[in-house]
Image (cartoon, helix red, strand yellow):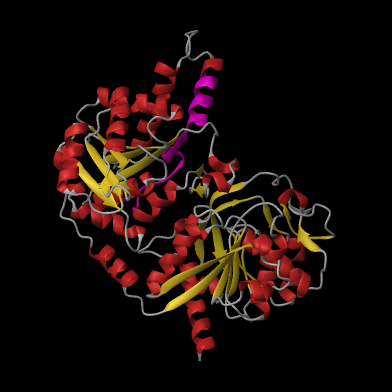
């Protein structure tokens, strides 16, 4: 079977939404019976985003096989059922690291190692590796990070130029650009798009389609102008205007303009009839909610809209499932106590979520958030660090261990209820490294977690170093905490909950990575339902 390749590039400015666009294209093709795969090529020299500041890069998305990847893979997951793994993301850092190691081993037989052909050949190998991770794959969608004109992206662009030269009938180039409206002049301007395509053509890449990000639909006259100056067929100039209500409108808008049909013709794909009724029904629910729920998120990186991207989306998925409108209120954890009272700062929400994170900044604000929820019987959901916060708060204010802490924040704490595995005496030689990827978890029957999942064995993705210290397990259980999930064939705590509370639950993993708009994650679904119930009781 011949595999086809779609290369998605971006021009004019960054943050155009290449990831969302690539995901929407994948959704449309998958809907029409095509088996797809995704590859994100990132031009930065970091080996992966795992050590990058979320304020710079946004969230780190984790795959089942433990790869720390770009957040765009989260979009791919939410819009499609494409396989995602280490083969789905490659950075310049990874590429150069591989090439240099090969040179040191003598794999190049003493040749001068250069960007062309050695680096570009390695990039092409990554594309092929992604294509062959599943034998059923028919189309690979390759998104090139950065903006045309960035020096960092040049090796990737040269690689895809070569790739298409070697497979002229199997490749399609889609260029995403920006068509601004100048309010003072009262005109839409195509010049930035023209320059962007000129820069792309100078590299040797000729776009087959141009997707135009814009505030309002483009007139046929504007499309004709772009077609003429950019040497692209007029019907292949498609506008991608800002959506009014939800990012999940994007596939429907592109389908309305015939994007999927056009791709099928250009790549000679056999497409079945489109059936987007489930997606349309979901959007109808968004537009016609039957109620409202307010969720407060208390975290370190609230000011960056992409730092908790998957968390926000998972909450929206659960709200859509419940048929209600979601309002998210964001609270910087290190400012929660500025007014002296956590109640005054964060009150007014129907439930609270504390997401994952690292480091000590904002710890006490999160602790007081958990205490506020526990004492006032307000739904609380802790993710990764959020579960550890719940544990420390319970140890301090219920068990009476006033100095209880995590050794991440206080290495010398007298009561390390959260610590690295290597610091826990009964567990040897397992600490000091990140627990990454999917791990199986056994659930306790009758627990909140078991009721949510409806089964006793689950698999969830992890990204953390610190664990609950089982030396304290009996003391917690005596005071009413239930450890409702544990690592299969092990004793590591994965889920903790308080059964005397309406809904207070923490997980050591990241369930947000496995939520889709039509398939909300069970724990997010139940959390939102608990918040809706709490809201109804407070309004009575």
Task: Tell me if residue 100 is in the magenta stretch.
Answer: yes
Q: Residue at 41% across / 37% down in the picture?
A: 145
Q: How many labels does the image show?
A: 0
Q: Which quadrant: the N terminus?
A: top left
Is residue 269 at all visible to an observer of this figure? Answer: no
Q: Residue at 29% across / 41% down in the picture?
A: 137
Q: In which quarter of the image is residue 180?
A: top left
Q: Which of 470 and 532 is in front in this view?
A: 532
468 up-or-down from 91: above or below:
below
Q: In this view, does 256 lie to the left or right of 241?
A: left
338 up-or-down from 115: above or below:
below
Q: Where is residue 419 in the image (x, y as percent from the top left)?
A: 73, 55
| View extreme (front): residue | 184
Q: Residue at 24% across / 48% down in the picture?
A: 239
Q: In this view, does 164 lie to the left or right of 486?
A: left
Q: Where is residue 46 in the image (x, y as percent from the top left)?
A: 55, 34
Q: Which of 225 and 316 is in front in this view?
A: 225
Magenta region, main secondary structure: helix
Q: Where is residue 445 in the image (x, y as percent from the top left)?
A: 55, 74
Is residue 123 at all visible to an observer of this figure? Answer: yes
Range shown magenta: 80-102
354 up-or-down from 531: above or below:
above
Q: In which quarter of the image is residue 202?
A: top left
Q: In which quarter of the image is residue 482?
A: bottom right
156 up-or-down from 102: above or below:
below
Q: Where is residue 442 in the image (x, y as percent from the top left)?
A: 56, 63
């Amino acid at each position: 079977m011949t595999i086809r390749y779609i290369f998605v590039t971006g021009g004019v400015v960054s943050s155009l939404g290449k990831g969302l666009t690539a995901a929407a294209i994948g959704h449309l093709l998958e809907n029409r019976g095509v088996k797809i795969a995704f590859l994100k090529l990132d031009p930065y020299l970091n080996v992966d985003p795992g050590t990058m500041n979320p304020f710079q890069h946004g969230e780190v998305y984790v795959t089942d096989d433990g790869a720390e990847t770009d957040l765009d893979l989260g979009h791919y997951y939410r819009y499609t059922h494409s396989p995602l793994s280490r083969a789905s993301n490659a950075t310049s850092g990874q590429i150069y690291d591989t090439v240099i190691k090969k040179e040191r081993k003598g794999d190049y037989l003493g040749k001068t190692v250069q960007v062309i052909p050695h680096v570009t050949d390695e990039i092409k190998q990554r594309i092929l590796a992604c294509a062959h991770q599943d034998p059923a794959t028919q189309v690979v969608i390759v998104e090139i990070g950065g903006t045309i004109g960035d020096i960092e992206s040049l090796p990737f662009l040269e690689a895809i130029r070569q790739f298409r030269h070697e497979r002229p009938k199997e490749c399609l180039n889609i260029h995403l650009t920006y068509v601004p409206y100048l309010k003072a002049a009262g005109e839409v301007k195509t010049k930035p798009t023209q320059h962007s395509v000129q820069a792309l053509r100078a590299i040797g890449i000729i776009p087959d389609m141009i997707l135009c990000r814009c505030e309002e639909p483009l007139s046929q006259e504007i499309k004709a102008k772009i077609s003429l100056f950019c040497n692209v067929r007029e019907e292949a100039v498609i506008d991608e205007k800002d959506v009014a209500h939800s990012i999940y409108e994007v596939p429907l808008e592109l389908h309305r303009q015939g994007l999927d049909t056009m791709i099928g013709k250009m790549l000679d794909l056999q497409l079945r009839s489109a059936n987007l009724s489930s997606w349309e029904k979901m959007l109808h629910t968004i537009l016609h909610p039957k109620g409202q729920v307010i969720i407060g998120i208390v975290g370190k990186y609230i000011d960056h809209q992409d730092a908790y991207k998957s968390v926000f989306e998972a909450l929206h998925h659960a709200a859509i499932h419940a048929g209600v409108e979601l309002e998210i209120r964001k609270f910087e954890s290190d400012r929660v106590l500025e007014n002296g009272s956590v109640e005054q700062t964060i009150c007014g929400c129907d439930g609270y979520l504390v997401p994952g994170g690292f480091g000590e900044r904002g710890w006490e604000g999160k602790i007081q958030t958990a205490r506020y929820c526990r004492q006032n019987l307000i739904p609380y959901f802790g993710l990764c660090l959020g579960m550890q916060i719940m544990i420390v708060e319970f140890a301090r204010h219920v068990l009476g261990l006033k100095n209880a802490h995590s050794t991440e924040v206080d290495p010398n704490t007298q009561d390390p209820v959260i610590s690295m595995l290597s610091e826990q005496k009964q567990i040897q030689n397992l600490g000091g490294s990140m627990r990454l990827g999917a791990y199986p978890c056994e659930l306790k029957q009758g627990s909140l977690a078991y009721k949510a999942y409806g089964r006793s064995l689950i698999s969830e993705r992890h990204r953390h170093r610190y664990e609950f210290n089982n030396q304290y397990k009996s003391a917690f259980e005596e005071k009413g905490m239930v450890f409702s999930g544990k690592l299969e064939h092990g004793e590591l705590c994965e889920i903790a909950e308080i059964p005397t509370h309406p809904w207070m639950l923490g997980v050591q993993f990241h369930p947000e990575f496995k939520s889709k708009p039509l398939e909300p994650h069970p724990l997010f679904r139940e959390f939102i339902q608990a918040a809706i119930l709490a809201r109804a009781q407070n309004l009575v």
